[in-house]
Every structure is written in structure tokens, then in C-alpha cells.
Image (cartoon, rainbow, N blue to C red):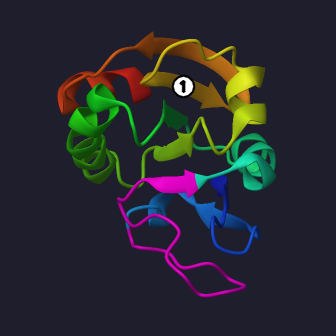
């Protein structure tokens, strides 16, 4: 049976999930909180590396900041894309002001910047606010 590994954003546990169960609202085996609830996950410098390297689902990271107008404008679109991609990809938000190590590692120079990762490796990136449909396409 094919599986994906998903790191719990709440406790850091790595969960092995069968492919045919990804859409069944799985909970973490350790802390019992939802793993794939269709909402963006907030990460910081402490949790970022372990989460993106050990999660085998595609991860789309939104590097943003609370003072950024385009970031705030795109936030509802990012949330809508997360709902559409539930069980197929994980959408992550990283506040670049609060998590300078992650932002520096990816050479983030403007925000919002979306970076698509697979097992921690960058595959694509796009800067600027996007509508939900383009966010979904970038994650896929």
C-alpha cells in the first residue's frame, strides 16, 4: 500500500497515511489533532525544516508579513486554495519578519512570495498576490 508522510504542525510527529485515506480527515497519531483539515498551517523557524523535509505531500509556502497589504489581500485566496487542495497538498504560512532564517534560506526579497517544495527542495516560486486558481495551479 502506498503512503505519504505528514508531519503534525502541532506536535511534530511524523504520521504515515495510506494514499486512499488522505481525504478522510486524518488525525495525528500522537496528539490527535487534525493533519489535513484544509486550512493553511503556520510555521516558524523552529518548525519549518522538519515539517517541509519530512512531509512527502507537496508543500506550498506563503512567505508574508502582517504589515504587507498584498499579503493581507491574498490571505483569503490562500485559504480558499488550501480548502481546494485538501488531501493533495499542504499550504503553509511563514511570517518572514518572525522567521528570518527560513526567509533568508529561500532568499525571499519581496512578499508575498509562494514557494512550492517537495521533500524540502524548491520546485517553483512566484512573487506577488495571486487568486486562488493560480495558487492551486502552482501547488499542483
Q: Is residue 98 magenta?
A: no
Q: Position of residue 78 (x, y in %)?
A: 30, 40
The image quadrant that residue 71 belongs to is top left
- Name the secondary structure under disc 1: strand
Quarter of the image that includes the C terminus: top left
Q: Where residue 54 appears, x then y in whole percent?
A: 77, 48
On the question of residue 2 being in view, the answer is no
Residue 117 left/right relative to 110: right
Residue that numbered label 1 is attached to:
116
Q: Residue at x 55, y 42 (%)?
A: 95
Residue appearing at x 54%, y 25% in the figure: 116
Q: Position of residue 130 (x, y in %)?
A: 25, 22
Query: Magenta region: which residues?
Result: 24-42
- Residue in the foreground of this view, choosing between 133 and 29: 133
Q: Residues within 10 Å of mark 1 (few under 14, many from 20)?
A: many
Q: Residue at x 41, y 43 (%)?
A: 66
Residue 98 visible in this rendered orientation of the protein: yes
In-image side of 51 versus 26 (left or right): right
Identified at 49% across, 14% down, the residue is 110
Amino acid at each position: 500500500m502506498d503512503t505519504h508522510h505528514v508531519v503534525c504542525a502541532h506536535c511534530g510527529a511524523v504520521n504515515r497515511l495510506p494514499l486512499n485515506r488522505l481525504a478522510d480527515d486524518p488525525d495525528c497519531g500522537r496528539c490527535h489533532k487534525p493533519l489535513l483539515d484544509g486550512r493553511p498551517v503556520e510555521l516558524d523557524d523552529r518548525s519549518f525544516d522538519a515539517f517541509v523535509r519530512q512531509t512527502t505531500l507537496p508543500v506550498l509556502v506563503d512567505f508574508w508579513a502582517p504589515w504587507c497589504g498584498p499579503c493581507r489581500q491574498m490571505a483569503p485566496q490562500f485559504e480558499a486554495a488550501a480548502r481546494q487542495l485538501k488531501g493533495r497538498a499542504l499550504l503553509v504560512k511563514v511570517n518572514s519578519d518572525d522567521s528570518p532564517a527560513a526567509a533568508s534560506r529561500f532568499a525571499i526579497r519581496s512578499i508575498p512570495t509562494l514557494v512550492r517544495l517537495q521533500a524540502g527542495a524548491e520546485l517553483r516560486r512566484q512573487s506577488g498576490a495571486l487568486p486562488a486558481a493560480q495558487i492551486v495551479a502552482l501547488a499542483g
